[in-house]
Image (cartoon, grey):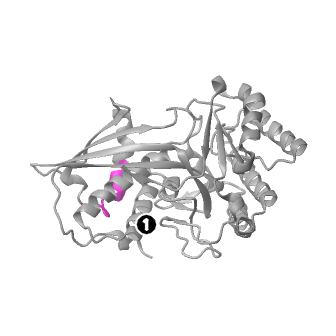
């Protein structure tokens, strides 16, 4: 499929003033994407769990301009407070998607957004935030062209979200989303995320993710900078091969319900991601001492209790504790009793796999 597929030829209806609202979740990658090229294309395929409770709620108010202009005209409000510092990233996003959404300069926008998770909690909000805006824009397009199908709507929303933040393309649907072309996954694409078409065993239904907030500050190295460091990384090609191979291994694991093999792949992926950071030039470390303490305690607990609890990491210090639903009570007790001392102010978020974005 070519990108031109998403360029509209015409619209049936004209809009004036109104508003649309979406709630879009964050996601956590099981096989990681780290390294990109061109307009936010991934160097390797990735797969993620869509989360449920960690989401961004966005209302997009639009007002038809009386006098046309050649400028993007919008204001951003976060939890009721105007945030001009958010505007450059959104303006860059609008520039990238203008070819596919030609009506952007015809309207003045107000973007009202809030998160269900604490701001600056160290949970990446770009995936949920940019996907929520993309979905709102697609709702406007559907009002202008009601013939748009649900499949096309989701594909284009994911395509647009990717141009705001790569991982945002995995936040449109649930429960397991693949992004990036992969030989063993039918329909996989560089352009947008798709629901994993393969069978998933009941062992992975309602999978739990408790997020331990180790560090709530701004990362010392942004994800954008980290991705760019993969361009000249001495182990980049091996890493891209490893990720695609791990995704090949994960498909039968998910089908057969082999949680032990799932743990090996997911934890290896998390550590490989951070190994790339530690071996880039310049090198950097996003894990904190408490991150390592939590990991070691998870390993000890798993061995002593024959548990299926495991961890994964995003590009930061926080730890996502993954475990089957039938272990929820025991694992939460373990977290409260042994792991909260290593969290910032003892904070953690109890979440689980979700179904994707919801129109409000």
Left or right, 223 with respect to 266, comes to: left
Q: Is 340 placed left or right of 109 in the picture? A: right
Task: Indicate the quadrant containing the N terminus: top left, top right, bottom left or bottom right.
Answer: bottom left
Q: Quadrant of residue 219?
A: top right
Mark 1 residue element: helix
Between 37 and 354, the residue placed more toward the observer is 354
Verify whether residue 93 appears in magenta: yes
Q: Position of residue 47 (x, y in %)?
A: 62, 60
Residue occupying image coordinates x 65% and y 26% = 344
In the rendered image, residue 74, in percent from the top left (x then y), is placed at: 26, 42
Q: Identify whether 250 is placed above or below 184.
A: above
Q: Is residue 245 magenta?
A: no
Locate residue 216: give its quadrant: top right
- Expressed as whole percent of the image width and height from the top left, the position of residue 58 reads 37, 44
What residue is rendered at 38% in x and 39% in y?
113
User: Residue tagged by mark 1?
Assistant: 155
Read off the magenta span: 92-102
């Amino acid at each position: 499929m070519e990108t031109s597929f998403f360029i509209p030829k015409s619209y049936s209806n004209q809009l004036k003033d109104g508003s649309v609202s979406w709630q879009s979740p964050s996601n956590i990658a099981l096989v990681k994407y780290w390294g990109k090229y061109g307009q936010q294309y991934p160097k390797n395929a990735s797969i993620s769990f869509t989360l449920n409770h960690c989401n961004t709620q966005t209302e997009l108010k639009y007002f038809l301009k009386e006098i046309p202009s050649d400028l993007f005209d919008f204001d951003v409000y976060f939890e009721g407070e105007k945030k001009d510092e958010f505007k450059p990233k959104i303006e860059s996003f609008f520039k990238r998607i203008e070819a596919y959404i030609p009506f952007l300069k015809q309207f003045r926008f107000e973007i009202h957004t809030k998160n269900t998770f604490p701001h600056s909690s160290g949970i990446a909000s770009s995936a949920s935030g940019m996907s929520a805006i993309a979905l709102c824009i697609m709702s406007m397009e559907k009002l202008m062209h009601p013939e748009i199908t649900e499949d096309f709507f989701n594909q284009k929303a994911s395509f647009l979200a990717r141009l705001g933040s790569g991982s945002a393309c995995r936040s449109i649907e649930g429960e397991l989303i693949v992004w990036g072309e992969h030989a063993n996954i039918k329909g996989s694409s560089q352009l947008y995320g798709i629901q994993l078409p393969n069978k998933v065993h009941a062992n992975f239904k309602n999978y739990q993710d408790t997020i331990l907030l180790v560090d709530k500050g701004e990362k010392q190295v942004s994800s954008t900078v980290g991705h760019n460091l993969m361009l000249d990384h001495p182990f980049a090609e091996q890493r891209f091969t490893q990720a695609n191979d791990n995704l090949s291994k994960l498909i039968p694991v998910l089908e057969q319900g082999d949680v032990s093999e799932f743990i090996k792949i997911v934890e290896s992926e998390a550590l490989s991601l951070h190994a790339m950071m530690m071996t880039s030039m310049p090198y950097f470390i996003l894990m904190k001492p408490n991150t390592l303490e939590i990991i070691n305690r998870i390993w000890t607990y798993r061995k002593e209790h024959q548990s299926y609890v495991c961890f994964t990491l995003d590009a930061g210090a926080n730890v996502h504790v993954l475990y089957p639903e039938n272990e929820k009570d025991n694992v939460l007790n373990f977290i409260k009793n042994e792991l909260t001392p290593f969290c910032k102010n003892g904070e953690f978020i109890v979440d689980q796999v979700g179904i994707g974005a919801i129109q409000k």
